[in-house]
Image (cartoon, coloured by chain):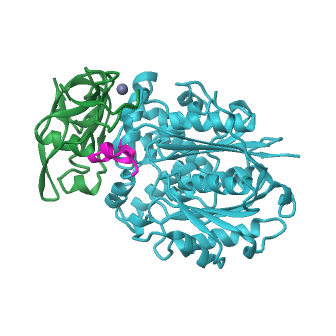
Chain colours: A green, B cyan
């Protein structure tokens, strides 16, 4: 199947353990997640760009009251999970889960800490799906 | 150079009311809108014949998800007995009814209609907390909610960025919560019309009645620091930092300026109207401000010829305590990083120089998301007309107030400036 520069491809990239964004061949702008055209120069001369997944933590939270989909995966008040904003070395930011840290003691997590992307899998509505999770580098 | 946005002709607010906000087992959204509508009719000084309403603009976020009901427009015109007048529902997450207000103002300003009803409603409490959490998260960017961000989670993330930059902590947000409760105590329509001190006494009373060990706290801050009564929702935000799940409705009557005196002895003019859009978290250059608010403020200030210093009171969108602090900075009331000091210094209390959220805010008045935007405007209208009862601000020459509404995680923000002239 032809991969389009869109959200679908972003999530499909994760299944192959890849963090996929795009680069504008015209002006060099890079985007993560991918988007259908360049919003700097408005040309649609895009190409795929794989991001390395190294970066640092910008901001985060530990979620104790969870949505239904996460409750079904066993998360909740006694088992919170962490999500955050990560700035990648390429200069763009992305949201992802933060793992390998103490979710019940979020005050021990330091903004600015170096992180590395991984792509673990979780069961969602009976289907195994990869997701973006950063761990301390 | 962009031109200054302006209204084609003057628009006045001449009536308005809200239902009680809360969690209602035996009432649905139609009942609540009916409450608001009937009280609105009473609020029009010289009366309104409902059959003269020419159009309805309604804000609602998610009746589709929460109630499995879409297409609310005709349900409401039927309820109000104004079929076949046109009705439209507008959606902008928690800013839905600010968008309805805006559409109503534009319809009158353009000369299309003279008399327009603007409303908002939401019914949420019959869903589980998990379902509501999921429903609200749908108003964030797809990459955010699919990553596991909740609404509280997004604002909690913003809070960590704010605390890191301005060397503040979650305990500094207690001042916002204490103020909200203090104000809501004076608002009979509020969901939580009770002070923290009273809540402490209630807890002790309850334990005593059940024969359990009676809890005690040194003061309100100790109470808010106690995880048994104030548990984490999304660290660093706790239960008392968050607005509740609410049902409620509110409506306002807008008319053309040239006929306003026929309805009201003291019409209030809509002088500023602004709206902006904003980025999801990962595209924001600065997590400690909302670009949509700044755009809305820029438009509304330009249209009105007024600035932040001219705004005597304001309702701002305190879906979470940290949000109130940031809005007071984005609207230009306080410098970046100073909002947290301002609330702790009491500057935004009802008796302070810049009263913020005299209604009790979303935190205590309640936050039926689709009704919130118009309910904020209602509070300013009541205050400007001296009809806010016990919570009337002690400002002698009160003429200008503003209502700031935020949708989703800052994707949509509005600012409405009202002025009493003459
Ligand atoms: Zn380009």
Against B80, is A108 above or below?
A: above
Give the quadrant of residue B274.
Answer: top right
Left or right: B412 as drawn, with respect to B127: right
Query: Residue at (78%, 50%) from the top-left corner?
Result: B9
Task: Say if the magenta span includes residue A8.
Answer: no
Give the quadrant of residue A97.
Answer: top left
Image location (x, y in percent) of residue B156:
38, 38
User: How many badges with numbers are in the image?
Assistant: 0
Against B333, is B199 above or below?
A: below
Give the quadrant of residue B44.
Answer: bottom right
Image location (x, y in percent) of residue B212:
34, 59
Dominant secondary structure (helix, strand or loop) of the stretch shown in magenta: helix
Against A69, is B342 above or below?
A: above
Image location (x, y in percent) of residue A54:
20, 23
Viewer-closest of A7 and A94: A7
The C terminus of chain A, quarter of image? top left
Q: Residue furthest right?
A: B422
Ligand 1's quadrant is top left
Left or right: B150 as drawn, with respect to B30: left
| Magenta stretch in the rendered image | B139-153
Is residue B385 visible to the viewer in this orientation of the structure?
Answer: no
Query: Residue at (17%, 59%) from the top-left corner?
Result: A125
């Amino acid at each position: 199947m032809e991969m389009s520069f869109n959200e679908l491809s972003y999530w499909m990239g994760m299944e192959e353990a890849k963090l996929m964004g795009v680069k504008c061949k015209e002006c060099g702008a890079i985007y993560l997640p991918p988007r259908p055209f360049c919003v700097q120069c408005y040309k649609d001369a895009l190409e795929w760009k794989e991001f390395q997944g190294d970066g640092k933590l910008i901001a985060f939270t530990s979620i104790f009251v969870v949505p239904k989909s996460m409750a079904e995966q066993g998360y909740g008040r006694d088992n919170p999970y962490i999500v955050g904003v990560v700035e990648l070395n390429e200069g763009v930011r992305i949201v992802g889960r933060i793992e390998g840290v103490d979710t019940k003691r979020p005050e021990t997590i330091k903004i600015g800490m170096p992180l590395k992307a991984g792509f673990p899998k979780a069961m969602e509505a009976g289907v195994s799906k990869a997701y973006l999770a950063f761990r301390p580098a | 150079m962009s031109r200054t946005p302006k209204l084609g002709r003057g628009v006045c607010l001449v009536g308005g009311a809200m239902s009680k906000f809360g969690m209602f087992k035996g009432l649905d959204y139609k009942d609540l809108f009916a409450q608001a509508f009937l009280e609105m009719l009473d609020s029009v000084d010289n009366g309104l014949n409902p059959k003269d309403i020419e159009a309805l603009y309604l804000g609602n976020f998610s009746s589709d998800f929460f109630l499995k009901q879409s297409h609310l427009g005709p349900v409401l015109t039927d309820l109000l007995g104004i079929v076949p007048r046109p009705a439209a529902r507008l959606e902008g997450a928690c800013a839905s009814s600010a968008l309805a207000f805006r559409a109503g103002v534009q319809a009158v300003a353009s000369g299309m209609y003279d008399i327009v009803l603007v409303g908002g409603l939401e019914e949420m409490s019959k869903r589980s907390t998990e379902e509501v959490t999921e429903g609200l998260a749908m108003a964030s960017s797809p990459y955010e909610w699919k990553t596991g961000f909740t609404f509280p989670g997004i604002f909690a993330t913003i809070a960590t960025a704010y605390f890191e930059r301005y060397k503040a902590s979650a305990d500094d947000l207690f001042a916002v919560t204490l103020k909200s409760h203090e104000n809501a105590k004076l608002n009979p329509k509020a969901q939580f019309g009770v002070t923290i001190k009273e809540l402490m006494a209630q807890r002790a009373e309850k334990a005593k009645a059940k024969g359990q060990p009676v809890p005690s706290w040194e003061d309100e801050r100790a109470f808010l620091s106690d995880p048994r009564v104030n548990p984490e929702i999304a660290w660093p935000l706790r239960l008392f930092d968050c607005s509740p799940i609410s049902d409620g409705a509110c409506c306002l009557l807008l008319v053309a300026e040239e006929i306003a005196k026929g309805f009201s002895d003291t019409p209030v003019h809509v002088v500023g109207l602004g709206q902006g859009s904003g980025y999801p978290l990962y595209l924001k250059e600065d997590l400690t401000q909302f670009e949509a608010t700044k755009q809305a403020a820029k438009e509304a200030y330009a249209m009105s010829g007024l600035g932040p210093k001219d705004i005597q009171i304001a309702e701002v969108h305190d879906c979470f305590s940290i949000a109130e602090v940031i809005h007071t900075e984005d609207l230009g009331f306080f410098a970046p990083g100073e909002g947290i000091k301002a609330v702790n210094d009491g500057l935004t209390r009802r008796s302070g120089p810049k009263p913020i959220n005299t209604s009790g805010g979303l935190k205590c008045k309640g936050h039926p998301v689709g009704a919130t935007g118009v309910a904020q405007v209602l509070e300013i209208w009541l205050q400007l007309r001296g009809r806010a009862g016990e919570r009337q601000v002690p400002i002698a020459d009160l003429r200008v107030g503003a209502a700031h509404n935020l949708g989703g995680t800052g994707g949509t923000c509005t600012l409405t400036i009202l002025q009493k002239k003459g």
